[in-house]
Amino acid sequence: MNSHLAVEANNLVKIFGSNRAVDGVSLEVPAGRICGVLGPNGAGKTTTINMLATLLTPDGGSARIFGHDIVTDTQHVRQLIGLTGQFATIDENLTAMENLRIFAMLLGYSWKDAKTKAEELLEEFGLTEAANRTLAKFSGGMRRRLDLAASLLSQPPLLFLDEPTTGLDPRTRSQMWGTIRRLVQSGSTVLLTTQYLDEADQLADDIYVIDRGKVVGHDTPSGLKQSVDLSSLHLQIEDADRLSEATNIAERILGESAQISEAAEISIPLKRSDQLTDVLIALQHEDIHLTAINVQQPSLDDVFFALTGEVTTYEAAD
C-alpha cells in the first residue's frame, strides 16, 4: 500500500452475465493530481468508477482509496469521495439554493451552515444570480455546474467525475475546466472519465486508456503521443512545377509515401525528427524553395486509434 496514492486498484474485475465488463483493470492515482480515463463506449470506464466509488462490488481484484479497502471499509471510503455521474442528480422542481441546502443538511450541516455552504458554492461556480431560480430555467451548463457543486458539499479529498462536460458548449466546458483545475490546486484529487480527448489532454496529468475492460495504455498525455509513431512533415513548395521533384526527394529520404494537396503541399510521415534536416538539405541542394515547413505531432486521437482501433466518436453512456 502506498500512502501517497489516492486510488490504488489491482486487477479489478466485474462480470455481468457472460460479459466481463471490467477484466483486470489496475491503476494508480497519486494524491493531488488529475487522472484521465479514456475508452470507447462500453469499454468499462463507468463500471470501473462505480466500483471505486463503492456503488458496485468487484467480482475480482482489490482497490483502496487513500489506503481504505473499497469492500471491507466501504463507509470510510464514502466519507473520502465525491461523485458526479453522467446525469445530473439535482431536483428540477427546486431552486439551486434549495438543492444545495437539502444536500448539505443530509450530510449533517445545520440549517444555517447549509445555507452558508450553499452560498459559497454558488459563488464559486458562478451561479449566485441564479440561486433562486428553479432548475427548469437552467441551461445544460448551469445544471452540470450545480451538480458538481453538490458533489463538493462534503469537501471530498477525492472526486470522481464521470463525463462531467458531456453535451456542454465549448465556452461552458472551458469554465468547467477552470473549476476542476482550481479544485486540484486547493488539494483535491480528481479521477476523470471523458469522451473528449482534448479535455483529457488539457486537464490530465496521467491518462489510462481502457478498451474491452482492459488497460491498453498508460502514460502522461505527452508520453502517450510520443509512443505513437505518427508525426508528419508538411512542406509548402514555392514553385508548383517542382512539386513532383520535391515529393520524390522526400519519399526517397523518409522511405514513406507522400500525399499532395491542391495547394502544392506535401504531407509525409516523419519517423525521426533528425530526418527533417536531411530532407531540407536535399531540397536546398536541388535549389527547391519552400514557403512553409511544419512538423505535426500525433494527437490523442491518433493515440486512441492506435491503441483501440476505433475512431474517437462516443456515445455518452458507458
Image (cartoon, grey):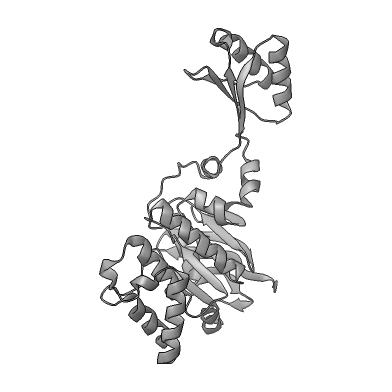
- Residue at the spot 54% in from the left edge and 20% down from the top edge: 265
Residue 180 spot, x, y in % from top left:
52, 64
**Observer-nearest of 210 and 212:** 210
Tell me the quadrant of the picture where the C terminus can be found. bottom left
Q: Residue 11, located in which quarter of the rendered image?
A: bottom right
Quick check: 134 left or right of 312? left
**Observer-nearest of 49 and 281:** 281
- Residue at the spot 56% in from the left edge and 72% down from the top edge: 158
Can residue 56 be seen in this snapshot?
no
- Residue at the spot 64% in from the left edge and 18% down from the top edge: 250
Quick check: 133 left or right of 64? left
Q: How many marks?
A: 0
Where 311 sits versus 22, above or below? above
**Observer-nearest of 245 and 214:** 245
- Residue at the spot 71% in from the left edge and 14% down from the top edge: 284
Can residue 296 be seen in this snapshot?
yes
Residue 107 spot, x, y in % from top left:
44, 86
Where 154 sits versus 183, above or below? below
Where 89 sits versus 234, above or below? below
Residue 72 spot, x, y in % from top left:
56, 81
